Amino acid sequence: MEKVHAQIGKELYKTTIQSATNTLIADEPVEVGGKGLGFNPKELLAAALAACTSATLRMYADRKAWDLTEVKVDVTFDRDAVANKSSFTRKIELIGNLDEEQKARLLTVANSCPVHKILTNPIEVSTELAS
């Protein structure tokens, strides 16, 4: 089970996020009252998909000993509150000596990355107050 801890004090809207081994800062953009010190929460969500996609493709290509020298992933995230719909658009650039069959396989693999699976299946969020 993955676990993170987030903490915010009086400084608008700087949030420190910690895992067992890493720390990062999330913040809101200046135009909404933050200082732009880190990714905003929606960017973090898009970043999780981009990072997972990149790593999954790297692992698969390495296992197959394919000549994939670099993966670039751009993810855009849009939330339509009226329609209650979230949309991710992912653009993947594969750099290396790959044929069309390998590229097609890597596209299929991208759709199997763990974060993609999480985001495209039912999600449940439970919330409780700590004592």
Image (cartoon, rainbow, N blue to C red):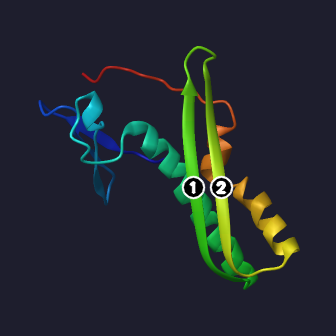
**Looking at the image, which residue sits at the far top?**
82
Q: Nearer the viewer, residue 20 or 96?
A: 96
Q: Residues within 10 Å of mark 1 (few under 14, many from 20)?
A: some
Look at 11% across and 30% down and name the residue there. 10
Q: Say above or below: 111 vs 55.
A: above
Q: Nearer the viewer, residue 67 or 114?
A: 67
**Looking at the image, which residue sits at the far left?**
10
Residue 69: x %, y % from top left: 62, 82
What is the C-alpha distance between the residues marked 1 and 2?
Answer: 5 Å
- Which amino acid type is marked by label 2? Lys
Q: Quadrant of residue 131?
A: top left
Circle 1 sits on which residue? Answer: 74
Look at 28% across and 32% down and name the residue there. 31
Q: Nearer the viewer, residue 35 or 5?
A: 35
Q: Nearer the viewer, residue 67 or 3?
A: 67
Look at 84% across and 79% down and name the residue there. 99
Circle 2 sits on which residue? Answer: 91
Q: Quadrant of residue 11?
A: top left
69 with respect to 35 (left or right): right
Q: Secondary structure at mark 1?
A: strand
Residue 79: x %, y % from top left: 55, 28
99 with respect to 89 (left or right): right
Q: Say above or below: 28 vs 76.
A: above
Question: Are discs 1 and 2 less than 8 Å apart at CB?
Answer: yes
Look at 30% across and 42% down and name the residue there. 5
Q: Say above or below: 19 vs 123.
A: below
Q: Secondary structure at mark 2?
A: strand
